[in-house]
C-alpha cells in the first residue's frame, strides 16, 4: 500500500485483504475497505458475518491473520499505538460504571487519558452539555435510562477527541426516540467536526438514515458496497407504476411498453425500473411520443430490507459473487 502524506485525500481507513480465522473457521475472508475522512460508513450483515471481528481488528483489539490496513495514516500492525491515539470505540453494550455518577465516569476517563485536571473538568462539562446529560450529571449511572447510558458511553469515547470512532451496534435496545437522538449526535460529529464514523448495525433504517456509504458483509466477505440508493438499484423489484383514466389509454400504453405488467381492474401498468433518472426519462419520452398522460406516476424502489435479504444468507437466492458498486 502506498503511503501518502496528503491528508486532504488520504482515507481515514484503508484496508486490503483482511483475514481472520478461529479454530479453522474463517470469519473474515479478504475484506477490502476504503473510508473517506469526515463520513459515515455502515457495515451491515447478519449475526456471525464478521462485523464485530472487523471492528476489533481495525481498532487493534485483535490482530488479523492476514492483510494490511492503515488507520488515520498509521499502519495497523507496525504502529498500533498511533492508531489507538486517533480512534475511539463504543461497543455493543455501554461500558460505564453503574456505581459512579455520569460526571464521575467522564472525569475518570479524562484521568485515564492523562488530561490535566482543569482540562478534564472542562471537557466533562462540555460533553455533559453537548449530549444533554447535564441534569443527569450527579445521578448514579444505574438510575439512568438506556438511552442516557448510551449517550454517556459515547461521551466517554469523545473525551479523547478521536478523529475516527467505531460504533458497534450503538443503538441496540433503544426506543425510537432515543435512537433518533443518538443519530442526530452522530451526524453532528461528522458534519460539524469532520469526524469519521465506522458504524455496524442491524437496523437497516439506521444505515439508510446515517451512512454516506454502506457495505454488506456476509460469511466474511463484502458482497456489495455503495450508497443506499446504489444498493437499492441492484435488487430486482424496482418499477414505475402508471395509472390511466380509461382502458383505451391503458391498452395503448401497454403496446408501447412491451415488458410491462398490466392490471385491467386498477387500470395500471407496472414497468421494470432500476430507479435511475435515465430510465424514468425514457418512460416519459415514450409517453410524450404517444401523447399519453397518465393520471399518476409512482416510482417504487426496493428498500435496504430487500437488499439485505437478497444479498445475505445461505439460501439458494444468496449471491456467490461480490457486487462492487461504481464509486
Image: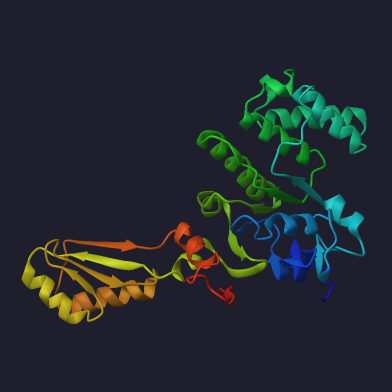
Residue situated in front as seen by the camera: 236 or 301: 236
Q: Quadrant of the C terminus?
A: bottom right
**Front-lying residue, 244 or 205:** 205
The residue shown at (56%, 39%) is: 179
Q: Residue at x 61, y 65 (%)?
A: 218
Q: Quadrant of residue 217?
A: bottom right
**Whole-percent x, y for residue 235 in the image:** 44, 69
208 on left or right of 193: left
Residue 178: which quarter of the image?
Answer: top right
Q: Is residue 10 visible?
A: no
Q: Please provide percent x and percent y for residue 46.
A: 59, 57
Q: How is the image coloured?
A: rainbow
Q: Residue furthest top?
A: 138
110 over 22 or under it: above or below: above
Q: Quadrant of the N terminus?
A: bottom right
User: Where 221 sits versus 198, above or below?
Assistant: below
Residue visible at 10% across and 63% down in the picture:
245
Q: Residue 193 location in percent, x, y?
A: 70, 47
User: Where does the image place residue 271, in percent across and percent down from the top left?
Assistant: 27, 72
Q: Residue 14, can we see it?
A: yes
Between residue 116 and residue 244, name the one nearer to us: 244
Residue at horizontal 62%, vertical 40%?
185
Quick check: 132 left or right of 180?
right
The picture quadrant where one finds residue 152 is top right
Amino acid at each position: 500500500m502506498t503511503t501518502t502524506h496528503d491528508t486532504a485525500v488520504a482515507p481515514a481507513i484503508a484496508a486490503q485483504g483482511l483475514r481472520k480465522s478461529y479454530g479453522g473457521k474463517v470469519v473474515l475472508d479478504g475484506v477490502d475497505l476504503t473510508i473517506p475522512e469526515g463520513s459515515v460508513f455502515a457495515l451491515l450483515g447478519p449475526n456471525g458475518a464478521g462485523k464485530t471481528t472487523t471492528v476489533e481488528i481495525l481498532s487493534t483489539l485483535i490482530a488479523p491473520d492476514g492483510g494490511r490496513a492503515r488507520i488515520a495514516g498509521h499502519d495497523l500492525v507496525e504502529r498500533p499505538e498511533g492508531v489507538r491515539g486517533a480512534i475511539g470505540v463504543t461497543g455493543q453494550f455501554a461500558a460505564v460504571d453503574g456505581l459512579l455518577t455520569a460526571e464521575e465516569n467522564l472525569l475518570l476517563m479524562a484521568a485515564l487519558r492523562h488530561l490535566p485536571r482543569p482540562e478534564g473538568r472542562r471537557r466533562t462539562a462540555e460533553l455533559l452539555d453537548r449530549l444533554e446529560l447535564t441534569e443527569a450529571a450527579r445521578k448514579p449511572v444505574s438510575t439512568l435510562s438506556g438511552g442516557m447510558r448510551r449517550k454517556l458511553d459515547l461521551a466517554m469515547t469523545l473525551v479523547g477527541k478521536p478523529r475516527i470512532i467505531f460504533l458497534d451496534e450503538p443503538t441496540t435496545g433503544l426506543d425510537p426516540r432515543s435512537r433518533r437522538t443518538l443519530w442526530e449526535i452522530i451526524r453532528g460529529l461528522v458534519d460539524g467536526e469532520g469526524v469519521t464514523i465506522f458504524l455496524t448495525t442491524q437496523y437497516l433504517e439506521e444505515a439508510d438514515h446515517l451512512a454516506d456509504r454502506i457495505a454488506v458483509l456476509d460469511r466474511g466477505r463484502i458482497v456489495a458496497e455503495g450508497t443506499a440508493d446504489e444498493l437499492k438499484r441492484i435488487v430486482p423489484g424496482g418499477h414505475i407504476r402508471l395509472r390511466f383514466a380509461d382502458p383505451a389509454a391503458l391498452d395503448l400504453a401497454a403496446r408501447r411498453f412491451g415488458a410491462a405488467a398490466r392490471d385491467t381492474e386498477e387500470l395500471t401498468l407496472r414497468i421494470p425500473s432500476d430507479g435511475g433518472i435515465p430510465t424514468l426519462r425514457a418512460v416519459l419520452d415514450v409517453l410524450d411520443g404517444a401523447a399519453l398522460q397518465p393520471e399518476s406516476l409512482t416510482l417504487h424502489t426496493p428498500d435496504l430490507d430487500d437488499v439485505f435479504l437478497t444479498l445475505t444468507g445461505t439460501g439458494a437466492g444468496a449471491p456467490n459473487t461480490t457486487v462492487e458498486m461504481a464509486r
